[in-house]
């Protein structure tokens, strides 16, 4: 997933406080947007990820079906 540059305006004092606290504003913005979009958006992202990675997931599942889980013989539970 790529990143896009965003220009926005914010209260100067709030920005000063955030910088002084070394807040990673890009992470805060991403988390706030995800929260604002809600669970439906997260579900859509999950579906898109699964669709984009379907071939790799199927390949992994075939390997597990053929060879079993890695390290299974060393487990004691």
Image: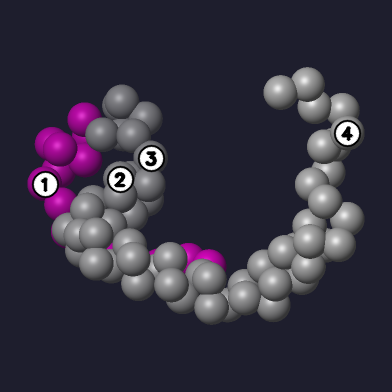
Disc 3 and disc 2 in contact, CB within 8 angstroms: yes
Cα distance between the residues tagged 2 and 4: 44 Å
The quarter holding residue 59 reads bottom right
Q: Is residue 42 left or right of residue 46?
A: left
For marks 2 and 1 on the same chain, the one whose residue lies earlier in the sequence: 1
> Label for residue 34?
none
Q: Which type of secondary structure does the marked residue at label 4 adopt?
A: helix
Measured from the top left, where is residue 72 in percent x and y?
82, 37
Specify the segment rendered in magenta. 1-17
Residue 42: x percent and y percent? 33, 62
Number of callouts: 4
Q: Secondary structure at mark 3?
A: loop
Instruction: Determine the residue positioned at 71% across, 23% down.
Output: 77
Q: CA distance from mark 4 to mark 3?
A: 44 Å
Mark 3 and mark 4 in contact (Cβ < 8 Å)? Answer: no
Of discs 1 and 4, which sits in the foreground? Answer: 4
**Residue 25, located in which quarter of the rendered image?**
top left
* Secondary structure state at the residue bearing disc 1: loop
Is 12 contained in the magenta span? Answer: yes
Q: Is residue 75 something that shows in the picture? A: yes
Q: Quadrant of residue 23?
A: top left
The residue beneath circle 3 is: 24
**Whole-number angstrom distance, CA of label 3 to CA of label 2:** 6 Å
Residue drawn at (13%, 36%) of the image: 13
Q: Residue at x 33, y 54 (%)?
A: 30
Camera-nearest residue between 26 and 40? 40
**Labelled disc at residue 73:** 4
Question: Is 36 in the magenta?
Answer: no
Q: Nearer the viewer, residue 22 or 62?
A: 62
Q: Which residue is mark 2?
A: 28
């Amino acid at each position: 997933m790529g990143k896009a540059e965003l220009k926005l305006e914010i209260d100067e004092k709030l920005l000063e406080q955030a910088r002084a606290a070394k807040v990673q504003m890009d992470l805060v913005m991403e988390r706030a947007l995800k929260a604002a979009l809600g669970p439906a958006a997260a579900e859509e992202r999950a579906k898109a990820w699964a669709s984009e990675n379907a071939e790799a997931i199927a390949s992994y599942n075939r390997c597990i079906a053929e060879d079993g889980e890695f390290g299974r013989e060393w487990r004691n539970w």
